[in-house]
Amino acid sequence: MADQLDVATVLYAYTRGIFPMADSQGQIHWYAPDPRAILEHERLHVSRSLRATLRKGLYEIRMDTAFTEVMRACAAREETWISETFIQTYTELHRLGLAHSVEAWRAGQLVGGLYGVALGGAFMGESMFSRAPDASKVCLVALVEHLKSRGYILHDVQFLTPHLASLGASEIPRRAYERRLRYALQLSCTWEK
């Protein structure tokens, strides 16, 4: 599995609680952190300022209309683990209906977004970006509402960062994550309404 980033390998890894990241040379590494970061949907923290942004309706939220562009925007930073190989593989997952993007648009421009992989009742969040205030957070709120409405029960965010913690993400032991993942994968949630 070391250097493979084909669709079958990635899907197999996700079902085992393992995910890939590329280093600065593009070499693929596989991770299964303990503890694992997740976002419990009922614990999503929407700050007063984010609530105000949502009320103003500054952004048009779309899903799956610019998947590859979202990935490229997520990769456009000084240090990134999203290599060109990642973009190709995950775009193929998107074509298969397994990888999805949530996008914030303003005046016809993509200004924020996130993407991840949906399997069974689990959503594996991969990355997010923002070019306008709160744009990625608005996408996350829309994603959580969508996942809840479709019956998804596990929202994996991989590693806990201060940004994710501020939004309500927390850590659980790997064994607990694996139990929850096994259960979530038995569900037959569908992304489309």
Image (cartoon, rainbow, N blue to C red):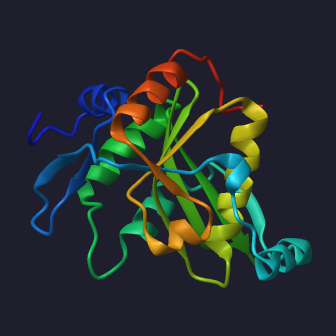
Residue 20: x percent and y percent? 25, 47
Residue 126: x percent and y percent? 43, 53
Q: Classify 107 as above or below 144.
A: below
**Image position of 150 (left or right of 169):** right
**Quarter location, residue 177:** top left
Q: Residue furthest right?
A: 55
**Image position of 68 (left or right of 19):** right
**Quarter location, residue 120:** top right
Q: Classify 108 as above or below 45.
A: below
Q: How many marks?
A: 0
**Image position of 193 (left or right of 113):** right
Q: Which quadrant of the rendered structure holds the C terminus?
A: top right
**Image position of 167 (left or right of 18):** right
* Camera-nearest residue between 80 and 84: 80
Residue 23: x percent and y percent? 15, 63
Q: Residue at x 29, y 51 (%)?
A: 86
Q: Residue at x 63, y 52 (%)?
A: 65
Q: Classify 127 as above or below 123.
A: below
Q: Which quadrant of the rendered structure holds the N terminus?
A: top left
Q: Residue at x 51, y 20 (%)?
A: 183
* Camera-nearest residue between 14 and 108: 14
* Camera-nearest residue between 139 and 75: 139
Q: Residue at x 10, y 56 (%)?
A: 27
Residue 66: x percent and y percent? 57, 56
Q: Classify 15 as above or below 60.
A: above
